[in-house]
Image: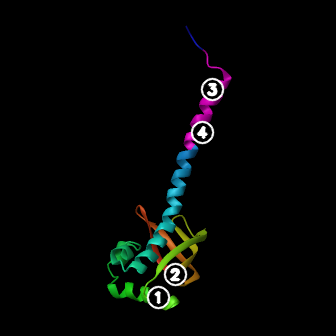
Amino acid sequence: MDKKASPGKIAGIIFCILAGICTVVLLFMDGYFSGQMKTIDKYYTSVARDDLNGFKSCFSPEFAETLTEADLEDQAKRLQALLGSEEIKTDVTFLSRYKLNSTIYQVNFNYTVYNDDDNVTEQAWTVIYRDGMKWVITMIKS
């Protein structure tokens, strides 16, 4: 007995295949671009928490080798000066992204430095690029 597929069945199969492909593409794009913001957020979080390993992981391995505890302390002092407090937390909000070439982006964002009593929000931007399978920061400008 030979069963023929109806046009409705064929359309349903095609729809399911296309939906699956779209889902995979969207998940890839979300992971690809959210990695940029995760790296920037990790930078600020590691500075606020005095985490040298986390701080270094935001940069290329070659540049990270040159970073010291003093570099981390300089960045922490800069953020602490915004509130006049040593106890700080940070939050980063994405604003926009511009593709500079196939692997390099300029990302514009706001970062908020806060504690229990006060907060300060500043706008900044960074140039970020893919180094292997992760995003790394080249610089951050306020």
Distance between the alpha carbons at the discs numbered 2 and 4: 44 Å
The N terminus sits in image quarter = top right
Residue drawn at x 57%, y 71% is: 93
Say which label, 3 or 2, has the lower sequence index: 3
Q: Earlier in the sequence, mark 4 or mark 3?
A: 3
Task: Tell me which segment is drawn in magenta.
Answer: 4-21
Which element type, helix, strand or loop, lies under badge 2? strand
Q: Which one is in front, 113 or 108?
A: 113
Mark 1 neighbour class, 10 Å CA radius: few under 14, some 14 to 19, many 20 or more:
some
- What element does badge 4 sit on? helix
Answer left or right for 50 relative to 123: left
Other residues around mark 3 within 10 Å, as few (<14) / some (14–19) / many (≥20): few
Occupied quadrant, residue 68: bottom left
The answer to the question of whether label 1 and label 2 lie on touching residues, with beta carbons closer than 8 A, is yes
Dot 4, how many residues are within 10 Å of its Cα: few (below 14), some (14-19), or many (20+)?
Answer: few
- Earlier sequence position, callout 1 versus callout 4: 4
Mark 3 vs mark 2: in front: 2
Q: For mark 3, what is the residue?
A: 10
Dot placed on the residue nearer the N-terminal end, 2 or 4: 4
- Where is residue 72? Give x, y as percent: 38, 84
